Image (spheres, rainbow, N blue to C red):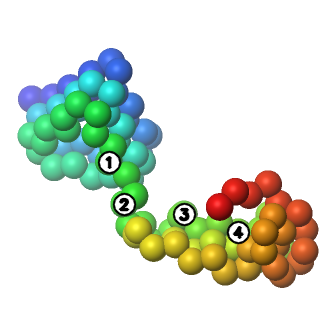
Amino acid sequence: MSVFVHPTAVVDPGAELGDGTRVWHFSHVMARARLGRKCVVGQNVYLGNVNLEEGTDSFCPHCHALLVHRMGYNTMIKKLEGDQCGECGKKLNFVV
């Protein structure tokens, strides 16, 4: 058995597709998504927002303060004040 991904579908690097899984038209499987064997991802499906232990938070590139904390579907703004870091005051290219 093998995996089938339609040419219009996107499977990000790091996603795991079980043997026999099929991903159809215009679907998107995000990195770190894990699908079991013989799954069928129908047309226009987005598989993302997976709860990850790391790599989902946003930090200030200058002082490394935690700006936005994400856990599953929950988002908490921590040290972001408008378009500036609340810790060091640097202007950031950040949209909430």
- Residue 21 is situated, as x and y percent measured from the top left of the image, at 16, 36
Identify the residue at image location x=13%, y=42%. Answer: 39
Instruction: Give the residue at mark 3.
Output: 55
Question: Do we see residue 66 in this rendering?
Answer: no
- Rounded to the nearest angstrom, the CA distance separating label 3 from label 4 is 10 Å
- Callout 3 crowding tier (Cα within 10 Å): few <14, some 14–19, many ≥20: few
Q: Which of marks 2 and 4 precedes in the sequence? A: 2
- Rounded to the nearest angstrom, the CA distance separating label 1 from label 3 is 17 Å
- Callout 4 crowding tier (Cα within 10 Å): few <14, some 14–19, many ≥20: some
- Callout 1 crowding tier (Cα within 10 Å): few <14, some 14–19, many ≥20: some
Instruction: Give the residue at mark 4.
Output: 59
- Rounded to the nearest angstrom, the CA distance separating label 4 from label 2 is 20 Å
Instruction: Give the residue at mark 2.
Output: 50
- Dot 4: what SS? strand
Q: Which of marks 4 and 1 precedes in the sequence? A: 1
Q: What residue type is labelled 1?
A: Leu
Instruction: Give the residue at mark 1.
Output: 47
Left or right of 84? Residue 27 is left
Left or right of 89? Residue 38 is left
